[in-house]
Image: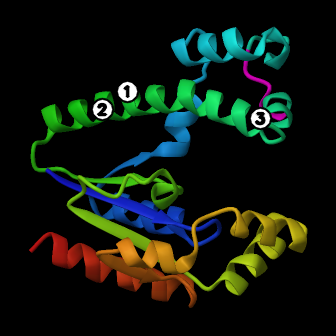
Amino acid sequence: MQLIVLTGGIASGKSTIGRRLETLGATRIDSDQLAREAVEPGSPGLAGVVARFGAGILLPDGTLDRAALGAIVFADPAALADLNGIVHPEIARLYEARLAAIRAADPDAIVVYEVPLLVEGGKTEGWDLILVAHAPAETRVARMVTLRGMDEGEARRRIANQASDEERLAVADEVIDTSGTEAETLEQVDQLWARLTT
């Protein structure tokens, strides 16, 4: 089994790359999806979050009120650390379970794990390949404003709160330049897949 971790800054094109690799035959695991599963109703993660932050962070249907929780943790670094201490082990558990199931089904699988904050989390060891989606900050700001309707100032703040391009590129084994057209990005992904599978 080959373990590829795919990372990149916000609006860098990670999902485009991940979807293409999945289309080509990779098994894709999305850490954002695992993070949602980690706090689903009935999960140990949600129970831990409620125990720490109170039932006020739940919506009437019992699901997590992300806006209410965000208002608490993004204003309080200690609260954010507490939240990460609850949720991150659950994400790791879900990832290991998913990986074990993939390994059992196909020992030769190529697994792509999308982790936006890989560098920030310091988890750059243990991968067969670190793949970085890269586009200049100005390109990513323009994408957030145009495609996501985000305020330019907010887009710049989000980029500033992530690892720098230099920090991500320093850990990369392979880089996909996503600053051109989508077709150009996909061509690079196809070339990478050809190298991985020959």
Alpha carbon of mark 2 to alpha carbon of mark 1: how far?
5 Å
Q: Earlier in the sequence, mark 3 or mark 2?
A: 3
Image coords of residue 158 (percent x, y):
74, 63
| Residue 186 drawn in magenta | no
Give the residues drawn in magenta, as a range.
63-67
**Residue 119 relative to residue 9: left or right:** left
Residue under the image location 77 percent in, 81 percent down: 142
> Label for residue 93?
1
Q: Residues within 10 Å of mark 2 (few under 14, many from 20)?
A: few
* Camera-side residue of 7 and 30: 7
Image coords of residue 12 (percent x, y):
58, 72
**Residue 101 relative to residue 58: left or right:** left
Find disc 2 in the rendering and name its residue.
Answer: 96
Q: Label 1 near label 2: C-beta < 8 Å?
A: yes
Which of discs 1 and 3 lies nearer the camera? The answer is 3
Q: Quadrant of the C terminus?
A: bottom left
| Residue 66 drawn in magenta | yes
Above or below, 183 against 101 in this view is: below
Image coords of residue 35 (percent x, y):
55, 35
Find disc 3 in the rendering and name its residue.
Answer: 73
